Image (cartoon, rainbow, N blue to C red):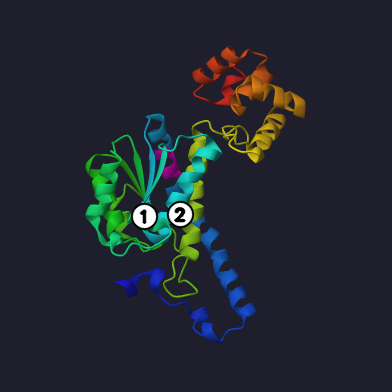
Amino acid sequence: MLEHLTTETRNEKTMNLDEMSIFDFLTTMNEEDEKVASAIKKELPSIAKAVEAIIEAKKQGGRLIYIGAGTSGRIGLLDAVECPPTFGTSPDEVIGLIAGGEKAFIKAVEGAEDSKELGMEDLQNIRLTKADIVVGIAASGRTPYVIGALEYANSIEAQTVAVSCNKGSDIGKVANIAIEVINGPEVLTGSTRLKAGTAQKLVCNMLSTASMVGIGKVYGNLMVDVQLTNEKLVERAKRIVMEATSCTYDTAEEYLAKANCNSKLAIVMILTGLSYEESLHRLEQTQGFIRQAIVN
């Protein structure tokens, strides 16, 4: 079956890869990488459907769960772990699962991706519910671990999305929403950590960022729910408050202290002139959307 997959075919531009100069190879690789964004553009309608589904799941209290094996699993994990510091989500709101467990992030666990049962069990272990949404990631689109996970998610009526780099993929046939980014053959045959990995990372960026915008985690283009976990982020929060309100540095610092280091709350307090309690109530009424809170 592998010979029929785009991700496994040979790239005619690099048939003499081992004879190319370093610069010629890098030029060719760069040209191939340029194809990724264009390939994703063709899948924007499907990506939009997935984002809408994630937003709906989040509104119902559901979780976004990425699941994959190897590079695909690592990409899902990477996107998941970036959500708490960026958007103020709790660690259990966006979850990344990888075949073989967390140890597989740094060292491959042989055979783990070949088990459909393991995919199902990993979702059972986090107590998947039908309110959740599962995004299965597999460059080939045929990884048993991911197929098993998506089949189980379907069986309990959870929403499912498949992200692959082959048209008519097996995981795409299982999932409710299929995102199939066709980048063409890799410069190094079958090395899907390259264009396929880049495509998957860009798609995950879109899924998480657009859905977080959709649930009020952003004001303008500012990450107003950023967590102040280190000095850099404390300074970033001050700049965010300054940008959102056109206030001075000292004012931003003052109101962040009054708001218990909550950037979103500090912004509402400055823009409305309301107290901590009143601003908090406004945000609760508007489900965290600053734009609605300041005009309510």
Tell me: residue 10, above or below residue 126: below
- Camera-side residue of 99 and 102: 102
Residue appearing at x 69%, y 32% in the figure: 238
- Camera-side residue of 287 and 113: 113
Q: Position of residue 162 (x, y in %)?
A: 36, 52
Asked if labels 1 and 2 touch by Cβ distance under 8 angstroms, the answer is yes
Magenta span: 48-54
Residue appearing at x 55%, y 17% in the figure: 280
> For the N terminus, which image quadrant?
bottom left
Q: Amino acid at mark 2?
A: Ile
Instruction: Give left or right: position of 65 versus 215.
Output: left
Residue appearing at x 62%, y 28% in the figure: 263
* Quarter assignment of residue 147: bottom left
- Label 2 Cα neighbours within 10 Å, binned few <14 / some 14-19 / many ≥20: many
Q: Amino acid at mark 1?
A: Gly
- Which residue has dot 2 on it? 75
- Label 1 Cα neighbours within 10 Å, binned few <14 / some 14-19 / many ≥20: many
- Camera-side residue of 105 and 68: 105
* Quarter assignment of residue 35: bottom right
Tell me: residue 30, above or below residue 125: below
- Which residue has dot 1 on it? 68
- Camera-side residue of 256 and 144: 256
Instruction: Give left or right: position of 222 versus 134.
Output: right
